[in-house]
Image: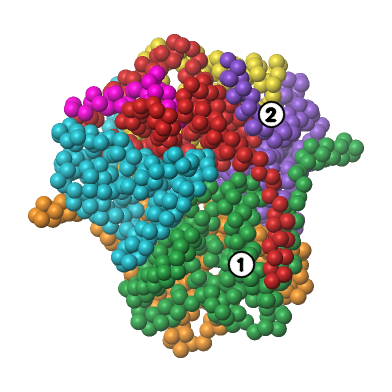
Chain colours: A orange, B green, C purple, D yellow, E cyan, F red
Amino acid sequence: MGIHNYFKSLSDLEELYRCPGKFKYQSHSVASHSFKVTKIAQFLGTVEEQMGRTVDWKALYEKALNHDYPELFTGDIKTPVKYASNELKELFNQVEKQMTEKFILKEFPKEYQDVYFRRFTEAKDDTLEGKILAVADKIDLLYESFGEIQKGNPEPLFLEMYQEALDTICQYDDLHCVQYFLKNILPEMLEEEGIPAMKLSEITEMIINRHEKV
Amino acid sequence: MGIHNYFKSLSDLEELYRCPGKFKYQSHSVASHSFKVTKIAQFLGTVEEQMGRTVDWKALYEKALNHDYPELFTGDIKTPVKYASNELKELFNQVEKQMTEKFILKEFPKEYQDVYFRRFTEAKDDTLEGKILAVADKIDLLYESFGEIQKGNPEPLFLEMYQEALDTICQYDDLHCVQYFLKNILPEMLEEEGIPAMKLSEITEMIINRHEKV
Amino acid sequence: MGIHNYFKSLSDLEELYRCPGKFKYQSHSVASHSFKVTKIAQFLGTVEEQMGRTVDWKALYEKALNHDYPELFTGDIKTPVKYASNELKELFNQVEKQMTEKFILKEFPKEYQDVYFRRFTEAKDDTLEGKILAVADKIDLLYESFGEIQKGNPEPLFLEMYQEALDTICQYDDLHCVQYFLKNILPEMLEEEGIPAMKLSEITEMIINRHEKV
Amino acid sequence: MGIHNYFKSLSDLEELYRCPGKFKYQSHSVASHSFKVTKIAQFLGTVEEQMGRTVDWKALYEKALNHDYPELFTGDIKTPVKYASNELKELFNQVEKQMTEKFILKEFPKEYQDVYFRRFTEAKDDTLEGKILAVADKIDLLYESFGEIQKGNPEPLFLEMYQEALDTICQYDDLHCVQYFLKNILPEMLEEEGIPAMKLSEITEMIINRHEKV
Amino acid sequence: MGIHNYFKSLSDLEELYRCPGKFKYQSHSVASHSFKVTKIAQFLGTVEEQMGRTVDWKALYEKALNHDYPELFTGDIKTPVKYASNELKELFNQVEKQMTEKFILKEFPKEYQDVYFRRFTEAKDDTLEGKILAVADKIDLLYESFGEIQKGNPEPLFLEMYQEALDTICQYDDLHCVQYFLKNILPEMLEEEGIPAMKLSEITEMIINRHEKV
Amino acid sequence: MGIHNYFKSLSDLEELYRCPGKFKYQSHSVASHSFKVTKIAQFLGTVEEQMGRTVDWKALYEKALNHDYPELFTGDIKTPVKYASNELKELFNQVEKQMTEKFILKEFPKEYQDVYFRRFTEAKDDTLEGKILAVADKIDLLYESFGEIQKGNPEPLFLEMYQEALDTICQYDDLHCVQYFLKNILPEMLEEEGIPAMKLSEITEMIINRHEKV
């Protein structure tokens, strides 16, 4: 039994990389992803609150922070495998739940078992907070895939990821924060793509000329 | 102006590595560190609550999640520089505050400026949540330095970091969670150190013998 | 349809790392692992042949070379998940088979589909070649875990891997090559572990003295 | 003497990187390269067989698997050095042969020395299998250089490598498998290059519109 | 006290990376940067000498070699922080000087303290050698930022770095070597940018045709 | 022709790693190595000067800075290959010289060709400066191998490198700086090795007790 093992396991999430088996210019660990998702969820929650909805911040932070922790037990299973059949998906979820439960029973003192079992299993449910997490998770995926596309990654998978992420975000467009994202943030992101190829020669000439005139 | 720039900056924290200029077996980004500190703070808050104290979870999560964000503007300044004189420290804090303010005014819409200015500047204050953050920050530093010592890093700096981290944690030993850490978690960690050098030869012989007897 | 996609996928195996989610001093890709397993199998087959058994070299090389290729479709699923229940394992195998079949039907011209379907699915069966592959796969795992233990990796998982690998090898000790490995190669490996801590001071003194006497 | 040293040396090939001294987006070890060459040779052999020629599979696999093993002894010597003069090339080959021989005599038991001396020295000869190896080796080089060009590597060396590789492949165009490669696989590869710059804005708009209409 | 600590610290400069917190295709350590700056300064000095000016080579090499050594004590402070106010800059310089002095007093024997204090503090002054160093430092920065722009880095910071570097170089255009650089070297660099997207298809066709005609 | 190509080639030395084909905890590029050798040579020259000898600083810096530049043309050839026979060594040196000459004729304007041909070929000769370079080169190798041994690298090669380096240094023990190194710096280095395994448990207990007493 040991909370030490739990604390130590957090560092394992730094060694678990997303999208294995594909060349990437920039790699992202599950630890970093969890951080970014929580920060994004924080902003999305702020938008909802600003628009008058009540956000259960404690629930939102818990969901965002812990949503990928069980990957520690199951490893990185490719999505098409997971969703190959309803039966397999169902079995997977059972196994994931059992492994999480086993870990908690082994490592956590009795008085903390209930709260952690809840923290590690609740996630993308139908509450406002569950929906915000679902959106934040996909916004980070959108940024990860955009980053690869923008840097010139020729692998078509990243375009598929971009499309799948955006598609899922749009499914939550009854949320104020999704409307805000689609109207204000996404256009700023796409604008970047449009930056014309840098004309270094012209910039260079301009700088040199400016000095010569002095 | 652009929340897009804020979301994109989160990825810069994945490229900012802690303890630059020293050989490390395992590197830790500021993004990963922030994730681990927030998870540790979550556990420490749970201990306090279990012992009857009221935790302002929203405040705790905000502090933990954002506590190192301003490093994005200032870079990684070595501690001895920062604390070389009170005058320098004071000036430095002013500059950090100004740069954070400038970023928020430039990138955030008016309606979100106040909340983010608070989020990026409040941190290790005298509230229960501020203290828990201070402890969580040092527990992660303790784990990072322990990891290097355990892997055999000959650089004395990591022993200094271990000592400094533990020393600071002890200063908060009026907190239930610090007492819990010192009594239950730290001994588990140190026990690991004591694992006798693995006697592979004996283990090997045992396994082979077991098979031969069958 | 495209053999080009098949050739390109070989490079994806260079980006698929074994034992994700754990700190390692040295990482091994599935491509490198497949290479080493094939080279080890080549030696083991040579021992069998030397002892008078007939080796179907074509079959042996095919098995060794392709044994982990389907990981491309399924990703790296942690063993305990895979073996959580017979039902899950069965379902998994079906899904893996379907995904492999789908890839072949999509990318390979008709005239090559049969041979590749056989190449990607046959593997550790009860033939001599299937057994040699099973042993070679575990010998490489033994070397990978030994490498981490020897370099000082404090993670207990590597000792477990070492034990599991050796245990499986021993189950095939009716093979000449396993007897050869246990008698001749394993002791050489363990001898390395026994190298006394290098006494640099003594070596240094000796070298300096030798020069002074000249 | 020790097969253990031979097995251990396989891991050194994982640490030997191709094309040192040049910036690369994706690095390839000699171990990975050997794996890919063997897989490519397997396909090329399959084409020959399909066209009615007899392939000595054992010979083909041996050649492909071992063709770069002697780099372990000589290191990575730049091609222009090696071919600076016939005299130097001759001397180099002698030295490589001597070092390989020395290694085998030192590490391999007598009964395995002959077979390994053959395995480590035979390679790109005038047999069908030797030719297939020569082609497979260059196809992998073509893919490596194509990968860099496609990702935007501004270093002209990769274009030279691409040209040199293709040029050599063409010299074997009496082989069915080369004709197959030039006719069926290479065009698929080049088609990729032609993918128009991704119009993320249009894709984005399309996805959003689709949702709005629902 | 120990020159050993000084020698060992040189390796710390290999672990100190320039431009932290930003995605880069190619990273540059302070050690590598110092090497390149010294080599560039050597060429610039050669130009000055060729044009009839007297170069104090000892001074030039000392300045170039040591100009970033104090970063070891202060860490990588972002430029905008350093120059936020004259007062802060002044204080920083004092602290840097004190830390350098403290290191020298602690690690160097008395007879070498003066020379090293001079070596670690003199740098970009108004002498010819000081000016050459200032230019060489910016030429390397220009190459580093050009490298990122050329490889397709979408981060605008690298264009800003390019402009700032060129701007500073131009301020020294009374130097022969700066005129030489602007007239002869910079145009060669920019020419590279203009290389038309490689038309692999055409090159490929040409090579294949050439063989067919034979 | 282009100095631009020369400047750009400096960055290739950042991508050329020393001791390829062996697992290393810490890698060193030829660029970093050249920097460290020049810094070490600077100190050794200072010792000679302090003891009354005249140092030709310009020559010393030139030798140290450029001594490994020709590796750019030849790649990393393993020492045993290079020295396999006098004939091969002789031929190899000729080729290296020709390639260096070819590069200079191609890239450098006429007026700079002589000086660079001298800079790239002179090195470890019998002058005081040539000897200091030879020693500095080996001191850096000693530090590199010591670093691996100290971190626990089980590869015997690093002990061989340590011995070979020390042995060569001792051959120059008529130099004041070598005597200084052997007497003052080497013992400091070896003292580090003697640091007893850190007793974290005791340190931990001490820190906790100190706080409890307050």
**B92 lies left or right of F195:** left
Q: Position of residue A18 (x, y in %)?
A: 53, 57
The answer to whether C121 is drawn above or below residue E94 in the figure is: above
The foreground one among E206 and C157 is C157
Q: Which mark is residue D4?
A: 2
Q: Label 2's element?
A: helix
The answer to whether A143 is drawn above or below residue C112 in the figure is: below
The residue at the far bottom in this view is A52
Say which quadrant the C terminus of chain D sits in.
bottom left
Distance CA(mark 1)–CA(mark 2) = 49 Å
The foreground one among B214 and B110 is B110
Report the amino acid beneath label 2. His
**Rendering quarter of residue F154:** top right
Report the amino acid beneath label 1. Thr
**A79 lies left or right of B21:** right
Instruction: Indicate which label's residue lies in the foreground, 1 or 2.
Output: 1
Q: Residues within 10 Å of mark 2 (few under 14, many from 20)?
A: some
Q: Position of residue C122 (x, y in %)?
A: 66, 40
Where does the magenta region start and end? Answer: F110-137
Does C179 lie within the magenta span?
A: no
Residue marked by disc 1:
B168
**F77 lies left or right of D103:** left
